[in-house]
Image (cartoon, helix red, strand yellow):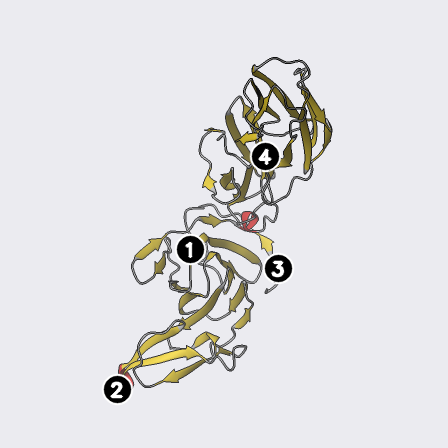
Amino acid sequence: MEEITGTPSQNPNPQTSGLSSADRWLLRVRGDVQVEIVDDQGRRIGPFLEREDREEGLRVGWFRQKREDEGEEGRHLRQNQTLPSIFEVSIPGASYKPERTFTSVLLTQPGMYTCKFLGRSPSAVDIYLTGFNATTRLDTIYFHGVPISERSSAQFAYSTYDPPVNLVLTLQDEARREDIPPTAILNPRESQDTLPPRTTISLKGEQVIVSATDNPGGSGVLQTYYTTDAQTFSVYSAPFLLPAEAKIVMAFSIDRNGNREYPGAVLPVLGLSATHLVFTATVGDQHIAPQVVYIMNLDPIPVTGPLEWVASTNILWLTIEKKEGRTPDLMTLSVDRGNLKPGTYTGDVVVRSLTPGVVYAERIVSVVLEIRADQEASSPGTVG
């Protein structure tokens, strides 16, 4: 990455680009994309391309360019796969530092530039364009989380002579075309914010409340995301009900400069392998097979660690083998029918987490014992 220093200045109008006095422009791209820049004279920065004169149809990673001035039509350009680390830098004064998931380009000459971002794999791409002059860092135009895949691309045109007030990034694939405005116009102080926001989670009954704050003097919170299964993430906008099938309650925030906290606020969930057990026996049975309940932290990532737990019951005919421990763990439940007469007997085993901040910290296993007067063979059963 290019290291450019300067004294931050305050932008009196954050709604404009604030780049009119720039004499250097730094483009930074975070995501799995190839970056290509072409100026108004056809000079370019990007991966080395070889030309194909034959019309062979579209291929992934190929770019079509008409050269009408040379009487050629449908000429193809593609990166030479035998020389994947060779790059072209034909724009005077420019430097190009490509990496797999981060690329920076420094432009030092005024001009009209078309900046292209070509997907290599599905990626949420962050794009920053920052202006500098001899003494000052200027504003940054920021696009957050642009969804680019191997079948799509994005681009914008930028004139240093007449910086656009409303720069638009065009995202395009085989099925659609979308114009995306900047996520934020960052003043010099905001664009140098390197600290992520801080997110907290609180529970009010079955309601989950998430809040986020940025560091003092930071760029401000952009969005907060949450999940209860570590697979589907949603943008938080209001308190939501805790789902019964939750495996984790996790929330994290991103600020207006793209700083993301990880893992953010995380609450583990206490889980049991079964919440309903049935024992069956006949009057003549001397032994009833015990049953095992596994006790676990349902966190699928995992980022929260073991949970301390204890178990208790008021069932006189039930014995709990191992009444406390740390997840992952198990407890064994055994029946002592003694002189119980034929009939149905019920009770509960309560499993509690002693670890602070656990969701569903108390779980109940309902236990049923059926003693039959007939001579049917006994068999244990487990439900849920």
**Between 376 and 220, which is closer to the camera in this rendering?**
376
The disc at residue 273 is 4
CA–CA distance between discs 2 and 4?
Answer: 72 Å
In whole angstroms, how far apart are the C-alphas of marks 4 and 3? 58 Å
Asked whether the residues under the numbered discs 4 and 3 touch, taking CB atoms below 8 Å apart as contact, a structural biologist would say no
Q: CA distance from mark 1 to mark 4?
A: 39 Å
Q: Nearer the viewer, mark 2 or mark 4?
A: 4
Q: Furthest-front residue in view?
A: 375
Q: Quadrant of the N terminus?
A: bottom right
Q: CA distance from mark 3 to mark 2?
A: 47 Å
Q: Which residue is mark 2?
A: 71
**Comparing marks 4 and 3, which lies closer to the viewer?**
4
- The first of marks 4 and 3 along the sequence is 3
| 338 vs 199, nearest the viewer | 338
Q: Secondary structure at mark 1?
A: strand
* Few, some or many residues within 10 Å of mark 2 (<14, 14–19, 20+): few
User: Which comes before the other along the chain, label 3 or label 2?
Assistant: 3
Amino acid bearing label 2: Gly
| Residue at the disc numbered 3 | 5
Q: Nearer the viewer, mark 1 or mark 2?
A: 1
Q: Nearer the viewer, mark 1 or mark 4?
A: 4
The first of marks 1 and 2 along the sequence is 2
The label number, if any, that marks residue 190 in the structure image = none
Q: Which quadrant of the view contains residue 212?
A: top right
Side of 335 relative to 235 (left or right) = right
Looking at the rendered structure, the kind of residue marked 4 is Ser
State the residue position of label 1: 147
